[in-house]
Amino acid sequence: MAAFNLTHSDPSPFILMGIPGLEAAYVWISIPFSVFYIVSLLVNFLVLFTVGKEQTLHKPMYLLLCMLALTDMATPTFVVPKALCIFWFSLKDITLGGCLTQMFFLHAVSLMHSAVLVTMAFDRYVAICDPLRYSTILTNWRIAKLAFVGLTRAVLFILPLPLLLSRQPFCSNRFIPHTQCEHIAVVKMSCGDVSANRTYGLVLFFIVIVLDLTLIALSYVLIIRSVLKISSKEAHQKTLNTCTAHVCVMLMYYTPSIFSNLIHRFGQSIAPQIQVILADLYLLVPPMLNPIIYGVKTKELRDKMGKYTCRL
């Protein structure tokens, strides 16, 4: 991905400014960045380690949790190291190729994350609405194929973004008021016609969000309809409780994602530092909380993770 066509641009690097207006507080800001990142890596690695070690967890639901954990480890990894270099050492330079590569992986992982959440909704739908066929419909091999489809979709959908930008001429003012090479932030650096980039990015955002949220909503409508047919209130509670973790993780991902994207595109009146902080928190907080939520709400996983945690 580093070998983009850069013939239309000079080799001058971009300058990632970090969080405009808060330069004096960079050392303090770096503390939560570091803590969130380290905790995110540790708890997600614990999920991967636990599922890998325990044969009883080699089931579709826990394989999906492993996929979620991988995306949760990758997301901050593409942002936090460079942000800390800015905060600690004022290393703000980044080449155009490096910027476009970061953009590609960051957005591709985000789409992969969304695909995992859709697959989890389908998993809950089958488990509740058609439990007798669950083991035949959702096999480990089928989960692997769905993961491959999600990865392919992410790559094919996101690849045009850096490819289109790599053909753009960029202005001499290459100061990006951000800690990362977010697509819209880089588009604003171009002196050429970026209407295609803006249109594709906006259409892609709404198509993916609307499509994925529609599929998730459809799954939960069918789940709720199935649950309402159950007469026992205890069964109601037990069935819906299995969906609570997924709903929490889904809300933590889609709500700030939509809010952050809309602010970057249409929130010109909002202070730049607020936009950057919101974008960074969206990439830092959910990856840290997701495995904790599933660990708390899923008894089998909680017990197994507790066993390995006590050994450390």
Image: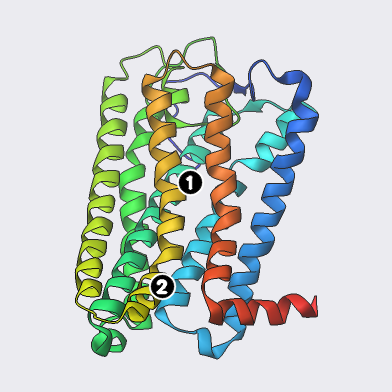
Q: Which mark is residue 163?
A: none
The residue that appears at 71% across and 79% down in the rendered structure is 308
Q: Secondary structure at mark 1?
A: helix
Query: Which amino acid, mark 2?
Result: Thr
As displayed, is residue 199 above or below residue 141? above
Q: Where is mark 1, residue-wise?
A: 105
Image coloring type = rainbow
Mark 2 is surrounded, within 10 Å at the Cα level, by few (under 14), some (14 to 19) or many (20 or more) other residues, namely some
Q: Secondary structure at mark 2?
A: helix
Residue 283 falls in which quadrant of the image?
top right
Q: Where is mark 2, residue-wise?
A: 242
Q: Is residue 60 left or right of residue 69?
A: left
The residue that appears at 32% across and 38% down in the rendered structure is 160
Q: Is residue 34 left or right of residue 243?
A: right
As displayed, is residue 102 above or below residue 65? above
Q: Using the image as rendered, state which of residue 271 and residue 140 is in the foreground.
A: 271
Sooner in the amino-acid sequence: mark 1 or mark 2: 1
